[in-house]
């Protein structure tokens, strides 16, 4: 009995002591909070498209536990911003009361916005607000700033029965429906042509289809932003014309740009953000001064009836391929493709390809990739083969971090497999003599490889790109590609519109020049 009495007294004493502790007493905040930043800049967003999430850290540097009477957005429930405070959502993400913060501790606030261009200041298109801490007579404030960009939104129609517009791919049992729509222009002046201008950016949801017999013209300076799983499909008998031009400033004012619809810097080089531009069987394309980046595939070209011409064009950071052709017919000049998950340029299932003064570089971090792939088949349980009628690469650079950046695969020995590399710099190291007896890589045969530089190591015949990680593949006079091309294939100006003055010319898409200083 005595032990039970002593134990009970001990428990009562502990409770009494705990009730006297001040560790968890909270004093009202007196305006002494500190912040990780005094202004949160949310990067540019399109009207009515949600932003990324941004972080603000709030510090209590005092020795007292405090209770912040109110954390709120200055515009209250009408604000287009949303915040969470240490995981709490408060009143619609706008207002929080009596938020406790221990001494020498901190809390996180996460900020997002979805705003319309009409909500922004008409003079500078900025949408602003504040996060306020304290009470109405003594608020500490952190400013919120977002630039809202107006845009033209193109997307499938939604019908009264709740279904949405789709495009049909294939026919019969192989027919598939995808989320998409046909572009439509009721302007009688243009007739069968659809025009995308540079007045405002375009944001595209789903696949924008160019119908048979129609032409899509994209004028210089136009910006197309694609949502996830979106792109362009050019139907049989339709034509895509990208009519960019040389730009004189870093704003690329005359370049046409295809990219994703996330404008924040963290998304600027993320591959696979959107789908592809698909030139289906029987379609045509004429591409000039286009920058295309961060898609799954840049261009998928299938059995095109007329030649696809692509010039002065840069394709970057595609999770599968920059250009994937299946029995395609493609002519390229001053084409630059950098960093793709499988191949920069893939001419598969045969076809016809002519590339002059092009630069293909692949530093993708896995080894299962190449800068250029050519084959004459489609893989499967029973591969189908098709003739590679010609594949000519003239004054080109084919390089990257892999041991072999040229991948030639001939499945059916009876099929035509014609190719020639003329005055090209090619990264190819015959590791363990794996390809010694493979006639496709007989670099001493001038009918296949004429005047080529074969880089067997990363130091040999280094093109010395300015900054390949940042898609700057221009070269200096110290490059192995300097004045090693052939005058037989020279294109008068380079991808930037600079006159080629070398005789002989440089290999690749760029006229060599002293490197500028990077900012």
Image (tube, rainbow, N blue to C red):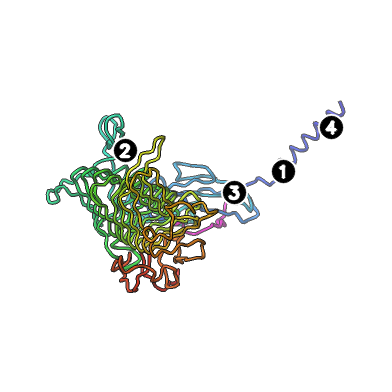
Q: Earlier in the sequence, mark 1 or mark 3?
A: 1
Q: Which residue is mark 3?
A: 101
Distance from Cα at disc 1 to Cα at disc 2? 66 Å
Q: Nearer the viewer, mark 1 or mark 2?
A: 2
In the picture, measured across the screen, residue 237 lies left or right of residue 188, that is: right
User: Seen from this angle, which residue lies furthest left?
Assistant: 188
Residue 96: x and y in percent read: 50, 45
Q: Residues within 10 Å of mark 4 (few under 14, many from 20)?
A: few
Start and end of the magenta stretch?
A: 29-42
Q: Earlier in the sequence, mark 3 or mark 4?
A: 4
Q: Which residue is mark 1?
A: 20
Residue 295: x and y in percent read: 38, 49
Check the image and report above or below for 276 versus 147. above
Magenta span includes 228? no
Q: Which residue is mark 4?
A: 6
Q: Which residue is mark 2?
A: 179
């Amino acid at each position: 009995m005595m032990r039970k009495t002593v134990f009970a007294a001990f428990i009562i004493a502990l409770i009494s002591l705990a009730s006297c502790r001040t560790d968890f007493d909270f004093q009202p905040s007196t305006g002494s909070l500190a912040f990780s930043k005094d202004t949160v800049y949310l990067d540019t967003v399109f009207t009515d498209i949600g932003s990324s999430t941004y972080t603000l850290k709030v510090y209590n540097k005092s020795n007292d536990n405090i209770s912040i009477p109110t954390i709120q957005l200055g515009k209250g429930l009408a604000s287009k911003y949303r915040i969470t405070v240490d995981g709490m959502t408060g009143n619609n993400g706008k207002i929080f009361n009596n938020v406790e913060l221990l001494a020498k501790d901190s809390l996180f606030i996460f900020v997002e916005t979805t705003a319309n261009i009409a909500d922004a200041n008409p003079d500078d298109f900025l949408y602003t607000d504040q996060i306020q801490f304290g009470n109405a007579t003594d608020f500490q404030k952190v400013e919120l700033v977002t630039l809202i960009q107006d845009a033209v939104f193109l997307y499938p129609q939604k019908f009264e029965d709740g279904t949405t517009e789709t495009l049909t791919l294939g026919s019969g049992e192989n027919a598939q429906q995808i989320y998409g729509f046909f572009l439509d222009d009721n302007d009688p002046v243009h007739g069968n042509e659809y025009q995308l201008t540079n007045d405002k950016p375009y944001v595209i949801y789903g696949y924008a289809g160019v119908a048979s017999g129609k032409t899509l013209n994209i004028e210089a300076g136009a910006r197309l932003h694609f949502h996830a799983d979106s792109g362009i499909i050019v139907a049989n008998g339709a034509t895509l014309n990208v009519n960019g031009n040389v730009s004189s400033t870093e704003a690329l004012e005359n370049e046409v740009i295809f990219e994703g619809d996330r404008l924040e810097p963290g998304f600027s080089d993320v591959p696979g953000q959107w789908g592809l531009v698909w030139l289906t069987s029987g379609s045509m394309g004429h591409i000039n001064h286009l920058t295309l980046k961060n898609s799954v595939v840049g261009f998928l070209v299938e059995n095109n009836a007329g030649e696809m011409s692509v010039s002065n064009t840069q394709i970057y950071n595609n999770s599968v391929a920059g250009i994937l052709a299946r029995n395609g017919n493609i002519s390229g000049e001053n084409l630059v493709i950098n960093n793709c998950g499988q191949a920069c340029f893939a001419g598969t299932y045969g076809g016809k390809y002519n590339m002059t003064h092009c630069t293909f570089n692949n530093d993708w971090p896995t080894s299962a990739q190449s800068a250029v792939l050519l084959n004459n088949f489609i893989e499967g349980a029973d591969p189908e083969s098709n003739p590679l009628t010609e594949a000519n690469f003239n004054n080109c650079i084919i390089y990257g971090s892999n041991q072999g950046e040229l991948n030639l695969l001939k499945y059916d020995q009876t099929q035509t497999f014609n190719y020639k590399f003329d005055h090209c710099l090619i990264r190819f190291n015959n590791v363990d003599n794996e390809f010694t007896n493979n006639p496709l890589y007989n670099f001493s045969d001038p009918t296949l490889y004429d005047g080529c530089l074969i880089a067997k190591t990363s130091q040999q015949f280094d093109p010395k790109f300015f900054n390949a990680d940042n898609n700057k593949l221009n070269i200096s006079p110290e490059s192995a590609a300097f004045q090693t091309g052939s005058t037989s294939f020279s294109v008068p100006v380079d991808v930037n519109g600079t006159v080629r003055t070398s005789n002989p010319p440089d290999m690749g898409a760029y006229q060599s020049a002293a490197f500028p200083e990077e900012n």
